Each structure stands twice: as C-alpha cells, then as structure tokens.
Amino acid sequence: MEQTPIAPFDLPEAQPFLLDGSNTGFLFFHGFTSTPQSVREVAHQVHATSGATVYCPLLAGHGETPAVLAKTGQVDWVASAEAALETLWSRCTQVIVGGLSLGATLSLNLAARFPEKIHGVVSINGSTGLYRPEVVAPLYETKGSRFIDGIGSDIAEPGMTEVCYDRIPQVTLKERFLLTNATGALLPLIRQPILIQQSRRDNVVDPKNAPRIVTSVGSSEIHLIWLERSYHVATLDYDRRLIADQISEFLSQSKFPHSGTQILT
C-alpha cells in the first residue's frame, strides 16, 4: 500500500522540543522562516555534553505556510520568545538564551529587556540592523508579488537541507527590519556574558553585525568566534559540532561573575 508522504513541516525533527536536564537552561531559537530542525542537532549535542535543560520552541507563523507567516509580525515573534522564556524560567534557576539568525536577534532582545531572568547570551549569525543595500531597497517596492523567494538552506556542506519556507511574504520583511534595528538600539543594555559566533561567508546576514555587537554591548565578557567553513545556517553546516562544543563550554563558564572586559577572538 502506497503511503502518503509527510509534509516537511510535519516531520518530527521540525517540531518544538524540550530536553530535560540540570537547573541550567538553554533557550535556543530557530531563524526567520525556519523551524527547530535547523538547530536540533546542535541542541542535542549541547544537552548531551553540558547536561543543561534545552528548549527549542517554534516561533509564531512558522512551521505552517508562508500565508500564515504573513499574518504575523515582530510583536508576535517577540511574544513567542517571551512565552518560551517564561516556560524555561519556571523550570531552571539559570537561563542562557541563544539562537540562529533572527533567533539570535530575539535572544539579544530578551537579554536587553529581561536581565533579571537571563544570565548569558549566544548569537549565531545574528542581525542587529546592518543590512546590505540590495536587501533594504526592496522594502520600498509597492508593486509586484506579495511573496519573494526564500532565503533558506544557505549551507556550504553538500547534502544538508534546512526545513523552511520557500517563499517569504513581503510584509514580513519590513517587520524583520523593524525588529533587528530596534534590537540593535538595545545592545548597550546587555550586561551578561555573550558568545558571538559568526560565519565569515554569510550570504543572508552581513558579517559586520558581529563586530557591531562586540562594540555595542555593555558586557564585561565577550567571546567572538569566526566560523571559517560555514555559511548562514551554520548549525547545519561544517562547523555545527564546533558551535555545540563552544556553547557547552560557555554554559559552564557563564555561571561565574567576571570582571574586566575580555574580548576573545
């Protein structure tokens, strides 16, 4: 009997998940138009190595259809992130937030606004409002299709694929622009230890965002790591094991107070 194929967003690996562990929690967000599938392998490795409780939620408008995403905006994505923070905060005494791409933006946003609940931040190819001109110009177009081609699976390693939308609603690009720029303005409020992992060749987010985070945050401990072998979706790329190892190490180190600004590259 022929079986009906499973739609990509119905696959088990694309669903949100919680890995129970210690009282240290790691809240891990996927990126724009993506799903938890993009960070699942790294999340499981971090859990296995560090023993931390790891929670990977699904952001509003994601994991369904581009039309559903079109009905959401930055307020909804932030609300999803805040709800996930409350979920993990209720289970853990220490919470570190992190994410890929827009997930990193949301992590920075939360860290700036909820310092009493967040003890550390991980940004993987995060955007803080620095865009290439060719990315910004289309935001002002009023004619043409309501959707543009997707930006997923920017991966150097052959055979690796991201479960994400193949089309992006034009209206959500403006929402993303607002969220990333607002978060960039909030960076000086971040005082927690921060790990910044940035691909040198990123075809989606301008790598200049990483140095911008370094020079803007108010943290006393700043780790900047350049990923030499991966493109934008680094959590599915050649450096994914390195990313997981660095996050695990960061989770253990962020338990302790630090004095004096340290920028490690």
Image: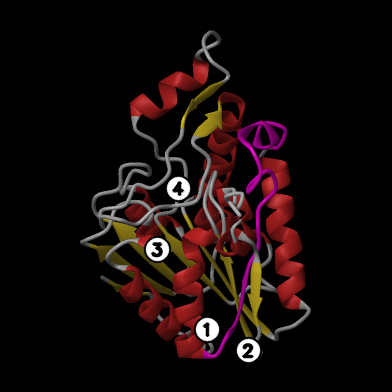
Q: Mark 2: which secondary structure?
A: loop
- Say which quarter of the image contains residue 224: bottom left
- Residue at 66% x, 44% y: name it: 64
Q: Is residue 69 magenta?
A: yes
Span colored in magenta: 51-72
The answer to whether 83 is drawn above or below residue 232 in the figure is below
Name the spot of residue 80 as percent of width and height, x first: 72, 54
- Residue at 44% x, 72% y: name it: 42
Q: Nearer the viewer, residue 158 or 128?
A: 158
C-alpha span from label 3 to label 1: 15 Å
Are circles 2 and 1 on residues that touch, CB within 8 Å?
Answer: yes
Q: How crowded is mark 4: few (under 14 residues within 10 Å), some or many (20 or more)?
A: many
Mark positioned earlier in the residue sequence (2 or 1): 2
Name the spot of residue 67 as percent of width and height, x first: 66, 31
C-alpha span from label 3 to label 2: 21 Å
Dominant secondary structure (helix, strand or loop) of the stretch shown in magenta: loop
- Residue at 34% x, 57% y: name it: 160
Identify which amino acid the numbered label 4 is placed on: Ser
Q: Mark 2 points at which residue?
A: 21
Left or right: 186, with 126 as reference point: right
Q: Mark 3: which secondary structure?
A: helix
Identify which amino acid the numbered label 1 is placed on: His
Mark positioned earlier in the residue sequence (1 or 4): 1
Q: Name the residue under label 3.
A: 235
